[in-house]
Amino acid sequence: MSNESTIRKAYEVARERYSAFGVDSEAALKTLLGIPLSLHCWQGDDVGGFEKPAATLSGGGIQVTGNYPGKARSVDELRKDLEHAYALIPGHHRLNLHAIYGEFGGKLVDRDQITPEHFRGWIDWVKQHKLKLDFNPTYFSHPKADSGFTLSHPDRAIREFWVEHSKRCREIGAAMGKAQGEACINNIWIPDGSKDIPVDRWSPRELLRQSLDKIFEISFPVSEIRDAVECKLFGLGSEAYVVGSHEFYMGYALSRKKMVCLDMGHFHPTESVADKVSSLLLFFDEILLHVSRGVRWDSDHVVIMNEDVKNLMEEVVRSKALNRVHIATDYFDASMNRIGAWVLGARSTQKALLAALLEPQVKLREAEAAGDYFARLALLEEARLLPLGAAWDYFCLSNGVPSGEEWIADIHQYERETLSKRA
């Protein structure tokens, strides 16, 4: 029996099994196909970007570990690697760009001087490949960020530099959204904070609020750009104090009608990001998720389908919020094949979404409503062994990408034929 026949046969059995639990697996697969992930460009070159002269990664607690051979050294190589990654991820997705990934023609273009023209090549490229773009200002790896402060810097001139950078990034994001006919999400994360105990926590936050208000003075159509702000608990070099805390950005976003971004690595290791979703959705129209895997700290490990990711996607689905939650990946690991890391993280995120879509919610809600908490817990436990793998393999097969572990050999072949030839 061929592999395709085996997958189809296994799925038919799985479909019947799910049906017995009151789950329509066909509807779940159709829903999953309509959920785009915004794949982060910075996994492909270790958050290096293409500025001239090349910036050294610094600031904000960002650290990429490893030196695996074959990283992208140019825009063309990064795009080639991305094309290969997207070909192994079922569905139709997006690309999340940082401002340092513009095409600057080998010239020094400081960040307060960037324009949409520096990203015209990306706009054309995603159109060719039927993708959509999201965007991020870059507040690290720059001399004006060396102090650890940017938008909340006490020096007005430095603050204004970063405010101008932010304004230009919003202009770029709006141009992307207009060109692609769908809003670009522009997400602001700054590294500002203190390694040791500050005396004045108020003033930097007041300055950050003022800077953000200046950045958002110009309005763009929501059809072109949607703005998000991203909080953090701590970072390397900002262990004692982060200006843009969760409480700061929750208050700012709610009062200014912006989107909150929750990065899974930006909270205490024992804190549940999943538990925040339903609370925020009661007060926000939309939220942004950055799916990552912190191991004891915000270490941005490659995403796997662990309990944290499963719980997060379950909460999104249970809240009936798939049309209100934007999902992006965010990690950078240079200790392994970078294209493999992209694909592994994206497929793992999709698997977690599929598991949530296939959850027997009707039976679970009936048990909960009846106060039968034993049945609720027992059903949750039985659902763990439902044939998710058979449904996932069929989803991959139906969308023309390798099923099971077949894609691993494809990554190895690309490494032999392409990555190994890079110095």
Image: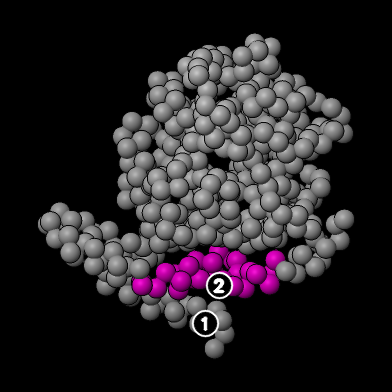
351 sits left or right of 172 in the view: left
Query: Is residue 97 covered in magenta?
Result: no
Q: Which mark is residue 323?
A: none
**Magenta-drawn stretch, dominant element (helix, strand or loop):** helix
Give the residue drawn at x 37%, y 58%.
357
In this rendering, the answer to whether 13 lies above or below 365 is below
18 sits left or right of 134 in the view: left
Mark 2 highlights which residue?
404
Give the extent of the magenta segment: 385-411
Give the residue drawn at x 60%, y 66%.
401
In this rendering, the answer to whether 343 lies above or below 329 is below
Q: Residue 263 location in percent, x, y?
A: 50, 42
Q: Could you say which quadrant of the image residue 116 lies in?
A: top right
Residue furthest toward the top?
156
Q: Residue 214 location in percent, x, y?
A: 56, 14
Q: Residue 349 location in percent, x, y?
A: 50, 56
Q: Quadrant of the N terminus?
A: bottom right
Front residue (pair 47, 346): 47
Q: Of the residues tagged 1 and 2, which is closer to the observer?
A: 2
Front residue (pair 390, 329): 329
Closer to the chain start, of discs 1 and 2, is 1
Q: Secondary structure at mark 2?
A: loop
Q: How is the image coloured?
A: one colour
Marks 1 and 2, how far apart at CA? 14 Å
Marks 1 and 2 in Cβ contact (< 8 Å): no
Front residue (pair 97, 220): 97
Mark 1 highlights which residue?
5
Q: Quadrant of the C terminus?
A: bottom right
Amino acid found under the numbered disc labelled 1: Ser
Give the residue drawn at x 48%, y 52%.
34
